[in-house]
Image: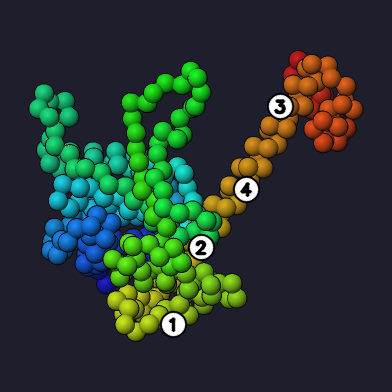
Amino acid sequence: MDNNVQNDNKARLFEFIFGREKNKKWTLSLYNAVNGTHYDNVDDIEITTIENVIYMSGKNDVSFLINDDISLYEHQSTYNPNMPVRQLMYLGKLYDKHIKKTNQNQYSSKQMVLPVPKLITFYNGKDDHGDTVLKLSDSFPKGRDSKESDVEVKVHMINIRPQYKSSILENCKPLSEYSWFVEEIRKNNETMEIGPAVDKAIDDMPTDYELKEFLVIHKAEVRNMSITEYNEEETMKLFAAEYFAEGREQTQRENVARMLERHKPIEDIVADLDVSVDYVKQIEAEMLVKA
């Protein structure tokens, strides 16, 4: 068993397939499909994914150097418009690592030479999102007094669900097979637990698929990673729901307090905000204590 496999409890399936030294041929195929290139020497790739990052902490799936590019690839099963800032933060770590490795001095009067960043998110969530470009500037305040940003980050999001028939899938057989596999797990999971759903997807994978042998050999690791990812996705959904609920509650409290400060009658507040009399009185009591 190689060293990469020993840390698979922190890996994700996409990284396990496309980010390993022994699978560089699949990484190269993916790079060629994304960029319309025809590189054929796997030794041209240098994997730069930062290791030993705690799971669910913003770790990027796969990053690598080839030619003069540094590519950051991530798979997302949930739509995330915040990928530009996440990738920017990760890119900063990679640049820091690259500068030290190449013995460049960022304080020198000599211009540093840095690889060109290419940021890609492969999306296959259930929500209907087509190919798009996510921009950091979309997160900036909009309005008459907003200032023009000196920084922009673009992440190209590509939908890889089979029904979208992306040209990327046509040009990269391993990605097409990965897309099929994830879709099968999702379909199986509708009628069975996630573990058996993964096992069935591996068993049902056509024998001529390049990934078949690899997934069978590493069936236990693939099963565990898929279960972890499924649990992570459900956990993140729960976090999002709780955060949304907390936000609504806070906004509601602020609205009630504002109306009380304006001496609006309690019955009017109840009618306008669709809250209970007791709720309004509780907030009123809290305001009196703080006064």
Q: Mark 2 points at which residue?
A: 230
Q: How far apart are marks 2 and 1 (CA)?
A: 20 Å
Q: In which quadrant will I find the C terminus?
A: top right
The residue lying at 13 percent from left, 58 percent from top is 44
Instruction: Report whether 217 appears left or right of 56.
Output: left
In front: 181, or 23? 181
In front: 151, or 223? 151
Disc 2 secondary structure class? helix
Q: Could you tell me the amino acid type at mark 3?
A: Glu
Q: Which of marks 2 and 1 is nearer the N terminus?
A: 1
Q: How far apart are marks 1 and 3 (CA)?
A: 55 Å
**Circle 4: is it few (<14), some (14-19), or many (20+) Cα within 10 Å?**
few
**Circle 1: is it few (<14), some (14-19), or many (20+) Cα within 10 Å?**
few
Which label was assigned to residue 241?
4
Instruction: Report whether 170 appears left or right of 269.
Output: left
Residue 75 position by quadrant: bottom left
Are dots 2 and 3 in contact, CB under 8 Å?
no
